[in-house]
Image (spheres, grey):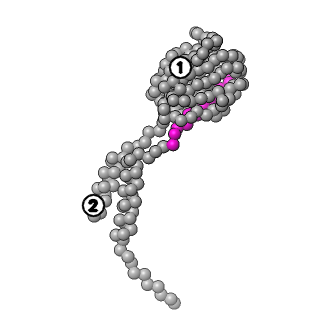
Amino acid sequence: MRKFWVTCSFAALVAASPAQAASLIGNTVTCSQVGAGSSYSCLFNSAVVGGGREFEVGAAPNAAIGLDFNGGGLKITNISGTSLSLSATILSLTNVSAAFSSANLLNSSITGFDSSDVALQNGDLRLNFVNTAWERNSSANIALDTAAAVPEPSSWAMMFLGFGAMGAAMRSRRRQKVTVRYA
C-alpha cells in the first residue's frame, strides 16, 4: 500500500505544472494618440515589452515622455529635460494582457494627472494627459492588477492526494497502549 501512495504522489508531482504570473513581458503592445488637437503622439506605434523604455511620446522627432512597462506596471517619465504642459493628449495602449483586471495610479508628480485619468478596459489602457503640467523630473507609476487566481486542476489533485496520504498515514499508524501510573 505504501508503494501505491509513493507512486501516486510522484505521478501527481510530475503532472503538476507551475502557474504563470500575469505579465506583459514579451507581449507586443501598440500605442496611439486618441482624438485630435495634440501635437504629441507616440513616436513608435508598437513595441515588444521588456528590457527598457517601450514607447516615447512627443512632437516628432523629439521625445518628451517615456513609457516603460515592467512585470506588473507602467512607469511614465518626463524625458525631455524641460517642463511640459499638455492640453489635449490622450494615449491608448492596446493589447495589454486580458489577465489584468484594473489599473491603479500608485503615485504621480505630474500636476493634473490623477487616478481618474487612468482606465483599463478590455486590454486597452487609456492615459488622459489633458491639462497636465510636468516638471523636469515628473513621473507616475501605474500598477496593473490581476484578477483573482483560480487554482488549476493539478493543484486540486495535489491537494486531495495530500489529504488522502495524510488520512492513510494516520489510519495505518499502530496504536500504542498508553499506561498511566501514579506514584
The span picked out in magenta is: 137-148
Q: Is residue 80 left or right of residue 29?
A: right
Residue at mark 1 to residue at mark 2: CA–CA distance: 58 Å
The residue at 55%/17% (across/down) is 32
Residue 164 position in % (x across, y down): 37, 61
Relative to the observer, which residue lies in front, 124 or 132?
Answer: 124
Label located before the other in sequence (1 or 2)? 2
- Residue 15 within the segment the image draws in magenta: no
Look at the picture and state if 158 lies above or below 170: above
Amino acid of disc 1? Cys
Callout 1 environment at 10 Å: few (<14), some (14 to 19), or many (20+)? many
The residue identified by callout 1 is 31
Relative to the observer, which residue lies in front, 14 or 112?
Answer: 112
Callout 2 environment at 10 Å: few (<14), some (14 to 19), or many (20+)? few
- Residue 139 within the segment the image draws in magenta: yes
Residue 169, by quadrant, is bottom left
Residue 4, by quadrant, is bottom left
**Nearest to viewer (mark 1 / mark 2):** 1
**Magenta portion: prevailing SS class:** strand
Amino acid of disc 2? Lys
The residue identified by callout 2 is 3
Q: Is residue 99 left or right of residue 111?
A: left
Quarter of the rendering occupied by the N terminus: bottom left
Is residue 36 visible to the viewer in this orientation of the structure?
Answer: yes
